[in-house]
Image: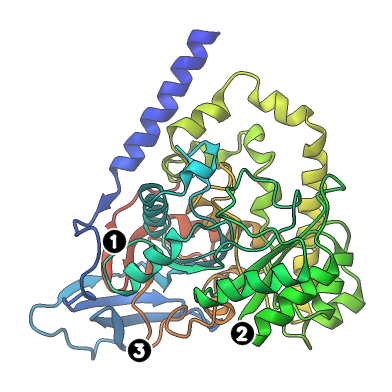
Amino acid sequence: MVLRSIFLLITVLIGSFSGLAQIVTTPQAPGRQTPAQQVVVLRNARVIDGTGAAPKEHVSLLLRNGKIEQIGGAEIMAPAGAQVRDLTGKTVLPGLISAHSHLGLIVDDAESSASGYTRENVTAQLKQYERYGVTAILSLGLNRDLVFVLRDEQQAGRLGGASIFTAGRGIGVPEGAPPLPAATDQIFRPASVKEARSDVDEMAAQRVDLIKIWVDKLHGKVPEMSPEIYKAVIDEAHKRHVRVAAHVYSLEDAKQLVADGVDVLAHSVRDQVVDDAFVRSMKPHNVWYVPTFTVDESAYIYAENPAFMKTPFFQQAAGPKLLAKFAAPGYSEKIKQDPQTVQHQKDFEIGQHNLKKLFDAGVSVGFGTDSGALPGRIPGFAEHHELALMVQAGLTPLQAITAATGENAKLLHASDRGTIAVGKRADLLVLDADPLVDIGNTQRIFAVYHDGHNIIDLPARAK
């Protein structure tokens, strides 16, 4: 049996590497010295523009210097020397944006460690997101100051990979959430209001995009941030014109945070079904809701050996060490017998119900996965799978895609991206099939353009 298990694992890994070989990464320098100088004309595409509008057929796009310069039909002329691509039968949508991901917390794809926050590891993760059509991410806390160096290099055109938005370190409490093995230079844990305000000031000076707070007692296992502390954080952040995103689990905490001025709920409410009073409170306060179904589902789904685990699209994102972990004797049984598995399944179901209720009420819904926080939350793959989970919760494919593109750009105050419009960044995900017919078709990637650069061609297909 042991030999048979080893043989099966080798077979899976060979298939994974075979799929990986289908990705052809466009040769380029380690960074991007300037936006793409070549002109690209994409013809005859079906375009989902990220605004929520119905798709348009037979569209041509002219990309120049990293921006979308023209949108039209056959009348668009290709300048001399332009690269022209016929996308008949293809669908083009904006590059995906994750409003809840993490960088540098995973080592060798399979272990969580503070030692992972290195230039080499973080840039590799950024490139993986990018290859999967996730052209921008918000690294929502637990960052070292290296993240600001990398962000500045990207903005200067010297570094590729998914565009970085960041919440810097973020703010927890002593001995509280998050319980990850984060080093002291990856999170602030203030013990007083004065310390909390000082921590906010330091992050604001670093030009963070948002400030992250953790408000969760993890089912009574750790102390929770007090309202006194998080009110001070929200107040100080707003004085500095910085918004606040909260890790949250319970409806009680979510209600109080909304009342106290939080700007983003960065996870689903999962302890109970949200009531009408909470739903009514969200819109007047302009609070964003980011469901992150991946958090709970990833805790148990791999033990069920779902069909997607056999696809190259999944396998090459997971990497050989994580695949070996999932295939190890006893892994599935251990997860199935873990008492926390039932809780995660319950939380997942409640979270899906709550998303549909809030979305139907007109609450602003963003898109995120918590990818990169733990090994099973796989950068790149998680974002495509999250789209499917949002559809499973009751959104249409178009609504889910809009949340991950145009709506997330609004959440990030990133007006230069998220939709396909003249003047916007040429961040495009080109698909072999229509995701409005089957949301799983977002995994059938044909090409990715980031700032007008052709990142990949002919990637592995989801089977």
Disc 2 marks a residue whose amino acid type is Arg
In this view, the mark in front (2 or 3) = 2
Q: Are marks 1 and 2 in contact (CB under 8 Å)?
A: no
Residue beneath the point at 67% across and 63% down: 171
Residue 202, position as x, y percentages in the image: 57, 72
Residue beneath the point at 60% across and 58% down: 369
Disc 1 marks a residue whose amino acid type is Ile
Q: CA distance from mark 2 to mark 3?
A: 30 Å
Residue 192, position as x, y percentages in the image: 77, 66
Question: Earlier along the polypeptide chain: callout 1 or callout 2?
Answer: 2
Q: Secondary structure at mark 2?
A: loop
**Residue, far left:** 80
Relative to 449, say whether 286 is above or below. Answer: below
Residue beneath the point at 34% across and 64% down: 448
Mark 3 = which residue? Answer: 423
Relative to 29, say whether 76 is above or below. Answer: below
Neighbour tally class for label 2: few under 14, some 14-19, many 20 plus, Cα within 10 Å: some
Q: Secondary structure at mark 3?
A: loop
Q: CA distance from mark 1 to mark 2?
A: 37 Å
Is residue 366 in view from this perspective? Answer: no
Disc 3 marks a residue whose amino acid type is Gly
Mark 1 = which residue? Answer: 455
| Figure quadrant of the C terminus | top left
Question: Earlier along the polypeptide chain: callout 3 or callout 1?
Answer: 3
Displayed quadrant of residue 210: bottom right
Mark 2 = which residue? Answer: 240
